[in-house]
Image (cartoon, rainbow, N blue to C red):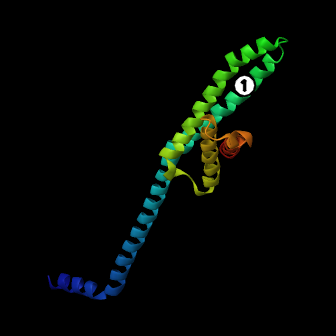
Amino acid sequence: MTTTTITVVNFMSSIHWPTVVTTTLGSGVIAALCNAGVNWQLARKSKEDDRYEKLYGPLKFNLLLMKLIVDNKDDVINDIEAYASIDLRVDMTIKHVSPLILKWREHLDNIKDLFEKNSGFIRRNDFSLVKDFMDGYVKIQIAQDGQNLLAVQSNRIDQILEAVKNLQNKLL
């Protein structure tokens, strides 16, 4: 039994305790830093997923539908222009183009609502596009309500069309 006790004591005395403590603490710190890095990446990915799910996914969907409506409206107008009778063209324009414009306007309102409800998810480099869109939206609201003749006279309504086109060019 003395030999076993002496061997354990010799083994324990041969360990360099400062190295063991430093290695143990160092590996713990490295593990904590790696864990923090992974958690940061997961949080960032989660925020990007939320941003896409709540704002950019629906935004792209509405912009795409607006583009398709405009393309189809242009085709319908080209078809209507083939008719000789002006009365028939006016009637067909009212009947076939007006609903497309109303649908386009619904998507415009949806985009405004998306920006209002999810403003915290707007990317910094997209703020100028959103500002132009919201400014154009306010101007079209004023002109539509007949409250500002300057908005109509100076073609300021075109700003919303340009803002939508810029958003489509960037996001689609």
Which is nearer the eye, 114 or 22? 114
Residue 9's x, y, as percent?
22, 86
Q: In this orientation, does residue 168 appear?
A: no
Element on which disc 1 rests: helix
Which is nearer the eye, 171 or 14? 171
In this rendering, the answer to whether 131 lies above or below 164 is: below
Q: Quadrant of the C terminus?
A: top right
Give the amino acid at mark 1: Lys
Residue 30's x, y, as percent?
42, 72
Density class for disc 1 (Cα within 10 Å; few <14, some 14-19, many ≥20) is some
In this rendering, the answer to whether 39 lies above or below 10 is: above
In this rendering, the answer to whether 103 lies above or below 152 is: above
In screen coordinates, is 81 left or right of 145?
right
Looking at the image, which residue is at 60% across and 39% down?
A: 141
Q: In this orientation, does residue 42 appear?
A: yes
Across the whole image, how many numbered discs are drawn on residues? 1
Q: Quadrant of residue 150?
A: top right
Instruction: Determine the residue located farthest toward the left in the rendered image.
Output: 1
Residue 17's x, y, as percent?
31, 85
Looking at the image, which residue is at 57% across and 54% down?
A: 123
Which is nearer the eye, 166 or 21? 166
Residue 100's x, y, as percent?
65, 24
Q: Circle 1 sits on which residue?
A: 73
Q: Quadrant of the N terminus?
A: bottom left
Looking at the image, which residue is at 72% across and 41% down?
A: 158
Which is nearer the eye, 20 or 165? 165
